[in-house]
Amino acid sequence: MSQAIRERVPNDVVVDILGGLPVKSLIRFNCVSKSFNSIITDPTFISTHFKLNLNQPKSSSISPNTHTGYYLLYKTSSSKELCTVFCNNDDHTMTQISRFEIPNVFDKCSVAGFCNGIFCLASSDKDLHHISYLWNPSVGMFKKLLATRLTSKDFRIVVFGLAYDCQNNDFKVLRLVGFFGREAEAEIYRLRMGSWTKVVISMESLRGYEPNIGTILDVMPPCVFCNGALHCMAFTRQGRFILSFDVSDERFREIMMPRNFRDGIIVMFEQVAVFKGSLAIIVFSHNFLNLGIPGGCLCHIWVMEEYGVADSWTRKFLVPLRDWVWEPLFYGCTDNGELLIKNASGLVSIDPESRNQNILAIEDSKWVGFSANSMESLVLLDEGK
């Protein structure tokens, strides 16, 4: 049947028709004939289809007023599955829209990054630190990435970051390694090239203060994407700062932390995050003195209002956390600025402006992410396993 169609319809028209179809339909058509398979698995078609979906995210039959985005749940306890759900605005119930089985090869892995429907998973076993994966659940394909192997005594931590380089139409994985007593190292994996390359961490200071703050001795996850660059916390003998890596020009730069942001508080931990599209530092501190604010833990939200300008750091919100636990888990922020935190009540979303807390009916998730859309692609279909 497909051969008859191709005889009547020019090949470029067939390609255009297939290019407008969703991933689920293309996977079905991929099994119809060799001719359809050759089109759908062609790297040029995959790239064109991806960019089309990136610029025009797939439409949904669900009204945008029904929910504000999608929660990605990576579950490994009772069942190994990746689920996409949204929270209904009216009654706060959860509606599942997709479910994918997690391959057994990921048993000792954790999610290190997510970008445009592609997941980066890294081994949790220190002896297998050099192994990571790119996984596209929409097409059921993954690719194993083998980086430089180190002896277990050589290093302290490995931090991964995943991003899409829109200028070069390429997915890239950044791997940072922190050692005991010597300078950190970096490698970059380019999907189009299919290999790792060492990158020298020579930094250029953005507009700010203290342009040279010494050799990087340690790094700390997570590694988040904002303004075309990946960002994580880095440490030198002089102090801490944010290490940024531009995924297009592949150069490192330093961004200074807010001045005196730790003064007068007992810090539990701090994380780099993205808050309403801006680079942010989320600081969790003890509230032993109460300070007239209820709750045993306080969340300080610092936002860089002008990217790269150190003096533009502003503490936007101070949020008391209810149902306090000694060290809450912070998963990040939704696109509208709600905090995703796991506390004594379970997984909750907190509006920093109103301080309203919404308990999400989500259990047993090893990792939780958030996406404004449920983008799917054919990436890895031509080269994954």
Image (tube, rainbow, N blue to C red):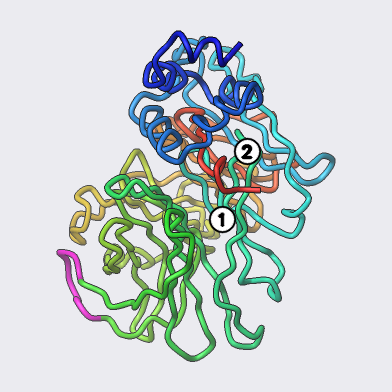
Q: Quadrant of the N terminus?
A: top right
Residue 146, placed above or below residue 384: below
Q: Going by the picture, which residue comes out furthest to the bottom?
A: 181
State the image coordinates of residue 312 (x, y, percent, origin top left). Answer: 19, 54
State the image coordinates of residue 56 (x, y, percent, origin top left). Answer: 36, 24
- Specify whether 245 is left or right of 22: left
Choose between 326 and 56: the one closer to the eye. 56
Mark sitting on residue 112: 1
Mark sitting on residue 137: 2
Locate residue 29: give its quadrant.
top right
Mark sitting on residue 203: none
- Specify whether 264 is left or right of 304: right
- Specify whether 156 is left or right of 247: right
Label 2, label 1: how far apart the Cα atoms are: 15 Å
Q: Secondary structure at mark 1?
A: strand
- Specify whether 266 is left or right of 87: left
Q: Nearer the viewer, mark 2 or mark 1?
A: 2
Q: Going by the picture, which residue comes out furthest to the right?
A: 78
Residue 114, placed above or below residue 159: above
Q: Secondary structure at mark 2?
A: loop
Looking at the rendered structure, the kind of residue marked 1 is: Ala
